[in-house]
Image (tube, coloured by chain):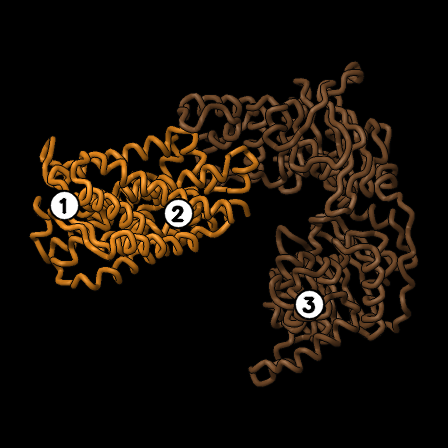
Chain colours: A brown, B orange
Amino acid sequence: MSDNWTVPLLSARGISKSFAGVEVLRDVDLDLTKGEIHALLGENGAGKSTFAKILAGVHRPTRGTLNLNGQPVDISSPIVAQKLGITLIHQEPISFPDLSVAENLVLGRGEGGWFSRVPWPEMTREARRHMDLLDVAIDVTRPMRGLSIADQQMVEIGRALASDSRLIIMDEPTAPLTPKEVETLFGIARRLRDEGRTIIFISHRLEEVRALCDRVTIFRDGNKVSTDAIGKLDDADIIRLMIGRPLKEYMHKQNASIGEVALEVERLTLPGRFRDISFTVRHGEIVGLGGLVGAGRTDVACAIFGVQPAESGSVKVNGKLADIRQPDDAIALGLAFVPEDRATAGIFRSLPVEQNITAAVPGKIAPSGIIRRATERVLAAESVKKLRIRLASINQPIGELSGGNQQKAILARWLLSDPSILILDEPTRGVDIGVKAEFYDIIGELAAQGRAILLISSELPELLALCDRVLVMAEGRLTAEIPRTEATQEKVMQAAVPRAQRVEAAA
Amino acid sequence: MNMLRGTLLRREAGIAAMILLFCLTVGLYKPQFLTVNQLRVILLLVPLIMIAAMGQMLVIVARHVDLSIGSMLGLSAMLTGMMFRDLPEIPWGVGFIVAIGTGALLGLVNGALVTAFRLPAIIVTLGTLNLYRGLTFIVSNARQVDRQFVPSALKAMSQTSPIFGIPWIILMALGIAALAYWFTMHTRVGRQIFALGSNPAAAALRGVKVNRVTLLVFTISGALSGLAGIMYASRWGFVNPSNTGFGFEFQVIAAVVIGGVSINGGVGTVLGVMLGVLLLGCVAAALPLLGIPGIAQGAIYGAVILVALVIDRSVRLQGIVSLKRMRA
């Protein structure tokens, strides 16, 4: 591949992207050579997926230029990308479940008018040929519905071949696959590379990157920090490059007196999600739960709260065995859970802030089943003041507030129920920096009041600044428990990056 | 094609079996149900439903629904009937152009409202169901177009036969079904309708012109309702502002849903819809024989729709459960 250095397949210059005024990608320069497998690495939100989506026409860059084979191109839509020979393969492929595999392969090529004939026999033959080329046994006449994720990915790769793509982008393709499927995928990726195609491989698994890729580009906070041959970097280098930002002093944690064990989780297991999770959280303590997205942290929280209970293992609340089968049980025991995805799991978008805040305490606002408006108003107003929620009116639909203030309202809702154990899942995601600091103050205060707090966060500085202890999960297992005094970004990241055995088999 | 066809055909075989079972059961109590004469009664009940059902099928496959077809039928039939009455010198064949054109225009309005304002089709067409019915009363001054004004050549289409004693109207319905089959299975836009219903977001990403396809399915639904409108005049010989096409949407949607077209979009076959129409025709023909009064028909259709929906949903859920088992 090194003789091809001089003719990049694609070169990006000064690519920047902002969403709603927030810059998520800054001045990225990158050359992709013909016939290489190029890894994009970075923490969650570092910008690697955004960059990949720009190449695939899903997003358009705010600034910057792209050259394909030396020609400037404007990749304005996924269809244009497809025509230019760029295919993005999503982790969970986007397909048409009711159409046949063959139709899924060819749909979207945009050839022929509305009433031109659908060439079934040719289509089926062509689809078979591509499946044969990939050496996978998928009946192309069956509907897409019911295919395994791995087979769906194969169909997507087949689609890339059918449109003769020169650049194939795989966004975390291995996460849902079994080791054997990963092996098959890697074999195919190498063959495609040897045919002179270029593959972008996005993954969190260093071993996989090492086994498969020729070069690696590392993103951090929306910047590209380096591009190197994979052999030049060892794991420690890569991790350092991924996290090497200065640790900001967000706050000084208030000194809470740490008391009795409030929440004790023992050998909690839900097959396919997490296994053998044991830990404790004491009153007045903030315990962080770190790890990469998809490590199973939210699943553990959902299991504790009874959203999707674990299959085995036990949960003790204040020393007593708790049988939590649904969120109601958890709420009755004094637990509260502020979910990550407030849009789907948290807010009632069109209802006023007031009702959003009081939604979890029907007993307080309507002791006899009829809502007492005055009580509701007072409770909500107090919360708004206490949490410094910025709004025009308490009767405003919550959807009109900024993300940070919505999040505060959700937190206020759960605080009204006066929980003794609080689980926060990515409480500061999508919240701007000023409000973040306020959140940290609030969380510190809550702990000082003697509440036990389990804080799930993907942001290392947040974990390090706030938590008394940091637990780390990787691929459904607890891989580290680090006390505050010993916690560093490197240690957390080391434990968070999966070190699956499977890759050795694939390599 | 084998497996895709296979899974789909299982559904059709099920409906065919239900038709057989139903007819035999009724025949057990009322032997006269299983006669050629009765078959004729059934076959004359269904052509209008079949014609409109082909359009409705496209709309539902695209994940929408068209509740306004009865009113589009009524308004198209009324305008056509009034033309026959007020301009008797115009050749009766022009009636087809007027009826289909009116229907297509009304359908286009439905589609435009759905696409331009991103409104749910069920609400839009509920609105136009009433709007179009109201317009029918306004243009007609609430007056019926009587038998003597409907051209006898048009009326003859429901009685005379060019071949094997099968009336024109039935041949026309079969022709529309054949056209629908060709359209859904062998044209690109036909497949795009299925892609759109199967996964709207992905369809847009793959270059399907979602708005245009949506406009198309509503326009086709309207045009076929218009055709059903003029055939109503042929079949019954009159056009009445309140009766013509009233409640038609329930029969048609029932037939389409019984025929295995999923209200979740993306799934449906012409053969299935034809069988669904036939089953509905059998039920309709059996009711008077079994002594069930005509006023109970609405309740029966409603029940039939619900049963079909429950079957559809449980078939899907089972599919998903077995899928999960496979992956686990």
Tell me which amino acid carries mark 1.
Phe
- How far apart marks 3 and 2 lie (CA) works out to 43 Å
Q: Residue at x 29, y 55 (%)?
A: B138
Label 3: few (<14), some or many (≥20) within 10 Å? many
Label ID, residue A102: none
- A194 shown above or below A97: above
Residue at which label 1 appears: B149
- How far apart marks 3 and 1 lie (CA) works out to 81 Å
B196 or B25, nearer to the observer: B196
Q: Please report, as a chain letter, where disc 2 is located.
A: B
CB under 8 Å between discs 3 and 1: no
Q: Residue at x 50, y 39 (%)?
A: B210
Nearer the N terminus, badge 1 or badge 2?
1
Residue A251: x %, y % from top left? 90, 61
B71 or A327, nearer to the observer: B71
Residue at which label 3 appears: A315
- B66 shown above or below A238: below
A491 or A15, nearer to the observer: A15
Tell me which amino acid carries mark 3.
Val
**Do marks 1 and 2 share a subunit?**
yes
Tell me which amino acid carries mark 2.
Ser
Viewer-nearest of discs 3 and 1: 1
Residue A58: x %, y % from top left? 65, 36
Outermost residue to the bottom:
A368
SS type, badge 1: helix
Viewer-nearest of discs 3 and 2: 2
SS type, badge 3: strand
Q: Residue at x 8, y 44 (%)?
A: B36
Q: Is residue B120 left or right of residue B48?
A: right
Q: Is residue A211 left or right of residue B160?
A: right
Residue at which label 2 appears: B262
- Residue B90 visible in the current orientation: yes
